[in-house]
Image: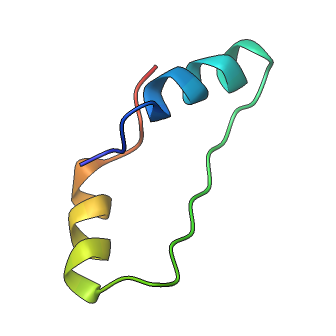
């Protein structure tokens, strides 16, 4: 699940010309990382 407010943030960055998105969460589990990958990129 994508965190609340991320779509808004992604939209603002896309409007500014960003063409990529990077995330990091060093305090997580393998299952949480797999779930995030399965969710795909944030949509605008």
Q: Along the horizontal axis of the image, is 35 left or right of 16? A: left
**Colouring scheme, one of rainbow, by chain, secondary structure, one colour:** rainbow
Q: Closest to the observer: 36 or 3?
A: 3
* Identity of the residue drawn at 79% across and 21% down: 17
Q: Along the horizontal axis of the image, is 13 left or right of 26? A: right
* Identity of the residue drawn at 27% across and 87% down: 30
* Identity of the residue drawn at 51% across and 21% down: 8
44 in relation to 20, above or below: above
* Identity of the residue drawn at 19% across and 81% down: 31
12 in relation to 41, above or below: above
Q: Along the horizontal axis of the image, is 10 left or right of 33? A: right
Q: Position of residue 35 (x, y in %)?
A: 21, 65
How many marks are shown on the rendered structure?
0
Q: Position of residue 38 (x, y in %)?
A: 22, 58
Q: Residue furthest top?
A: 15
15 in relation to 5, above or below: above
Q: Closest to the observer: 22 or 7?
A: 7
5 in relation to 12, above or below: below
Q: Position of residue 39 (x, y in %)?
A: 24, 50
Q: Position of residue 26 (x, y in %)?
A: 52, 83
For residue 5, what is the image quadrant?
top left
Q: Residue furthest right?
A: 16
């Amino acid at each position: 699940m994508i965190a609340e407010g991320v779509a808004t943030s992604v939209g603002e960055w896309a409007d500014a010309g960003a063409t990529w998105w990077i995330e990091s969460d060093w305090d997580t589990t393998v299952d949480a990382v797999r779930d995030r990958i399965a969710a795909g990129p944030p949509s605008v």
